[in-house]
Image (cartoon, rainbow, N blue to C red):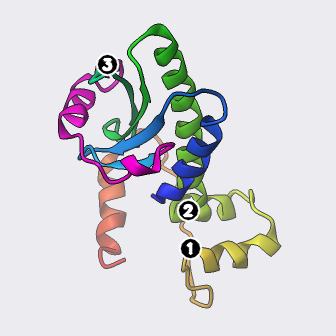
Amino acid sequence: MSNSVFQSVIIQLREISDRTFGVIDTEGCVVSCTDMSMLGERWADAALKVGNASENMVTFAQKTFKAIMGNSNYFEYAVFCTGDDELAKSFCQMAYISLNDAKTFYEEKHDRGTFVKNIIMDNILPGDIYIRAKELHFATDLPRVVLLIRQVGRADVASVDLLQGMFADK
């Protein structure tokens, strides 16, 4: 994921408060921050505390942290705000909402699976298909097949495994 997505939101947050906002990754590296001098710092202890608390806010070293969860419900990033008071918790929650939405939008926009689903479901304009395919480095001039399979009766996982086994190299 591009850290520039986080940085653009973080810069906007700078205007609402005199507090420092930022984002750390799973290793505790500051990947985005309103204070540019903090970029690249490593806070491994903070990342460990946030990873253990995942769903809750964590206060550590005069900063309030909130985990941004990934697709598999594991901690990918955490937003932080300086301070350990109620106002810091409110700011941190607000920053979390903004950054989580930006992350979700970025992932959906740059996800190949979502792109193919949008084509099949006719949720994308025909003129946008080639532009998005180029952005996602999708080869456009290849023959492709879509299999529509309907299971009558009880759904069985074995049929999915069978289909995946037929095209194991793809």
Q: Earlier in the sequence, mark 2 or mark 3?
A: 3
Q: Residue at x 47, y 18 (%)?
A: 88
Seen in the image, is 7 located left or right of residue 41? right
Q: Are marks 1 and 2 in contact (CB under 8 Å)?
A: yes
* Quarter occupied by the C terminus: bottom left
Identity of the amino acid at label 2?
His
Horizontal and vertical percent position of residue 113: 52, 61
Q: Which residues are magenta?
A: 33-59
Q: Quadrant of residue 16?
A: top right
Q: Is residue 38 magenta?
A: yes
Rendered view: 95 above or below 106? above
Badge 2: how crowded within 10 Å, few (<14), some, or many (20+)? some
At label 3, counting other C-alpha atoms closer than 10 Å, the crowd grade (few under 14, some 14-19, many 20 or more) is many
Give the answer, above or below, for where 83 lies relative to 45. above
Q: Amino acid at mark 3?
A: Thr
Q: What residue sits right under mark 2 in the picture?
A: 110
Local secondary structure at mark 1? loop
* Residue at (66, 35) in percent of width and height: 15
Labels 2 and 3 touching (C-beta < 8 A): no
Give the quarter of the image for residue 85. Answer: top left
Question: Is residue 8 covered in magenta?
Answer: no
Instruction: Work out whether residue 165 or residue 56 is closer to the camera in this orientation and state it.
Output: 56
* 26 horizontally vs 121: left or right: left
- How far apart in space, not on screen, are marks 3 and 1 (Cα)? 39 Å
Most foreground residue, 75 or 45: 45
On residue 97, the disc is none
Give percent across and percent down for residue 165: 28, 69
Disc 1 target residue: 136
Task: Using the image as rendered, state which of residue 18 and residue 52 is in the foreground.
Answer: 18
Question: Where does label 3 land, which residue?
Answer: 59
